[in-house]
Image: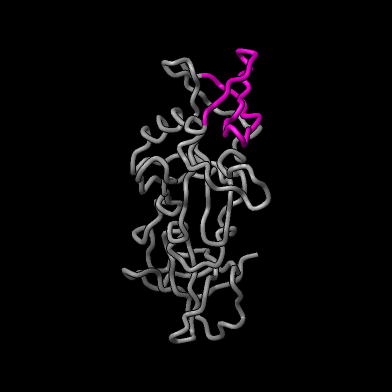
Amino acid sequence: MTVQGIARTWNPISKTLDVEVPDKDSFVRLKEEDISIYSTAKSGKNHTIPYEVFNLLGKPISLIQKSDGSFSHSACMLNEFNALNVGDVIKATVIRITRISVLLKYKGLTLFIPFKEISDSRFYDAHEYFKLYHKVFVKVIQKSDPSSYIIVSYKRCFSDNLNNYNSYDIVIGKVTSEVTYFNDGLFIEISPRVSGIMNCNDPSMFKYGDKVRCRVRRVTPKGLKLDFLSFVQ
């Protein structure tokens, strides 16, 4: 039987978590192994409560009643883990953003987007693509053991590819970096799966993040060759 509860109180001595179950008008106590499939050994920087427990406090969680009558949240998480397959595309909520990675929540599970799975283009910071608590589509690309975060990809949810482009097409993209080996062009991100090099006489007139309108001069196996047309406000 599955019930819904709200995580309320962590006991650091017994290492148990009290969960309020509104439908039963009562509390149940979870043993440490029934709290999460992730390790409860690590604490956050500003508190002594385990990181995984801290993220549950005050929030609704699902519980499974086991054959001995006790309840488990980790059993629900394990079922959710087993239900996901590599290749699945799911919608998850962004819960943490660093410069080089993103954590998301999907049901009771935590998902991880590494830097290289955000975009094929060169970029500085994952904050350019994500906002806290927004929902985004991601693709499952790696599962190991249940105690590790599932690795997912943001860029692989985009169907855009070089076959969608032809010479003389007009495209809008974002300036990401200079082509340093010739110093006469800029890398442009059209989408997380498509990028190109834009010819320009003076790269210094552009800055990172500028939006530009370009004409496709040529499509190559490595990307688009572009000519600058104008800035986009």
In the image, 222 versus 95, the foreground residue is: 95
Give how far across and how far down residue 162 sits, in percent.
36, 61
The residue lying toward the viewer, choosing from 207 and 111, is 111
Q: Quadrant of the C terminus?
A: bottom right
* Total count of labels: 0
Give the magenta range: 3-31
Main secondary structure type of the part rendered in magenta: strand
Instruction: Determine whether, in the image, residue 73 is placed left or right of residue 145.
Output: right
Colouring of the image = one colour
* Residue ID at (64%, 34%): 57
Query: Measuring 58% from the left and 20% from the top, which residue is drawn there?
Result: 28
57 drawn magenta: no
The one nearer the camera, 56 or 67, is 67
Q: Position of residue 128 (x, y in %)?
A: 58, 59
Q: Determine whether 49 is above or below 19 in the image.
A: below
Q: Is residue 27 above or below residue 38?
A: above
Q: Position of residue 188 (x, y in %)?
A: 49, 69
* Identity of the residue furthest to the front in this view: 13
Instruction: Give the percent coordinates (x, y) of residue 136.
Output: 52, 45
Seen from this angle, which residue lies furthest left? 221
15 inside magenta stretch: yes
Quarter holding residue 88:
top left
Image quadrant in which you'd find residue 26: top right
164 vs 48, nearest the viewer: 48
Q: At 56% across and 69% down in the image, what residue appears?
A: 212
